[in-house]
Amino acid sequence: MRPILQILLVVAGLVLFTLANLTNQRIWPNRLVSVSLESGILSSSQVVESASCSIYVLDPARDLGMPACDYSDTAIWPHALKKTGLGGSTVPLQHWEYQYSTHLWLEEAITNSGARTDRLSRADLIFVNMHCYEIWRAGKWWQTHKEGVKNGVDPELYRVQAMEYLRSWPQWRQSNGSRFVVAPFNPALPKKTLDAQRPCSSSPFVITSEHSMMCEQKLEAHARQGLIVPYVTDTHQEGFDPLAATRDTLLFYRGGCSPSSSSAPSGPRYSSGKLLRRAVVDAVQASNATDVDVRCGCDICPGALSHSQVLARMRSSRYCLMLPGDKASSRRGTEAALSGCIPVIVGPPWHTLVLADDIDHAASSVFISVRHVTWVVANASLARFDNRPGVLTDWYLDTELRPGEMLHVDTLAEVLGVLRGMPPEVLAAKQAALAREAYKQYWLPAPGEDKSQLGEIVVKRLCEHAQALKNRGIIPPHPTPLQRRKLLAE
């Protein structure tokens, strides 16, 4: 009887182990479906049967014992329970709708592609998901600066500590970090946090918002360092038809500008981008044109248009300005494209172009270079970090244009005439290209599709990176499990 009893105990143990593994594998899809039913924003997971690489999604709370986030806690995310106006929203904002919630959507893309593995020992790549601390950072900023509530908790410290610990892992040391995927996305990250997430002495794959967040800031170096991806926007789930829509407005713009059109004599008080915005708005308004809607106005400023109003006006406009601000990137280009409004990129300096190797920006946008630049300080001794002569070269265009794809004017006063003179067949071709390309900037599936085009592009690039590492022998055929510390995922 004793051998039979031992066999029965072993079989029972195997059954329980299998059930536990199956349960663990369903944690994220179940949570996502639950969120979808409650919010109507996130779709349920549509997992593909296979992928060409395997990616482990590392949760610092689960895998490293770091503090976790309760998103119903107003100290973490105060915007879900009341209208704060963040991002121009007129309703409470959920954490997955935040424009910097990129980590969450990367996790969703990895899951839906079939690339996700819940076993670290089977992973080609390790994605470090810092969604919790990015959300917590935004919540802390709001409470500190808008509500006057202060506490000693610093979510930035948790990000730095997590990365410092990961750099001691054998997977990091053996690959110099190249098997890790990091996403320092918010361009306002403190330098210490940015340096911790993508240390330039190592080679993690970087997914970010603009090339200023990369170590090597040269156009030819972008692809080998990572990807520049769009901000999160929760708009346009119904789709658009740029050719059929009524677009009575020639040109639209809303965004924060400098309050004056020139820098102070003692030195610039505003970024080159904000001064460029003011100069463009002043030039367009000086035309007294009645078919343009171009004004300054930040999302949270008194009297500002709500986010939904901005999007509605984009949908009724043929062209939408895409200008840098305090940083080179924003969500304006994505939202214009998803509205069927042709982005008009004016510079230098230039607004960021996302996924430049995958999106045909030249076909779907208008590029205008202005020769007479008055919004960048010429005297380096009077410069500041975001307004100096170097901005003209540092905020470079994220793609190479062919002859004729860049339009040149002497002054901003000529921009409106360039758009009015656009031949109808050129306008129609750009609208058609926009319809083909727009949903490559969208984290949700396009209408009638079950997977995000953007998510598929990102995972494809990650798997290409993994294959390149395999070809170089950096990823072994059967990666050995981490021995230093047993993870819950194991």
Image: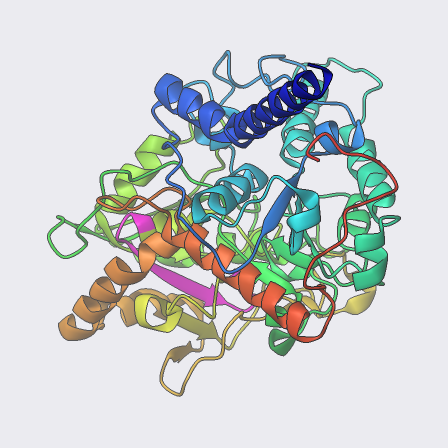
Q: Provide residue 261's location: percent of width, then percent of height.
A: 55, 53
- Residue 98 in percent (x, y) is at 51, 33
Q: Is residue 139 above or below residue 276?
A: above
User: Residue 201's image quarter?
Assistant: bottom right
- Above or below, 40 against 452 in this view is above
Find the magenta span and give its range. Answer: 338-352
User: Quick check: 1 left or right of 410?
Assistant: right
> Can I make out residue 333 in this image?
no
Report the front residue among 459 and 241.
459
220 w.r.t. 84: above or below? below
Q: Is residue 59 left or right of residue 446?
A: right
Residue 56: give x, y in percent of width and height: 63, 45
Give the image location of residue 264, x and y in percent: 70, 53
Question: Is 419 situated above or below 147?
Answer: below
| Residue placed furthest toward the front | 1
79 sits left or right of 128 in the view:
left
Marker count (numbered): 0
Quarter of the image holding residue 416?
bottom left
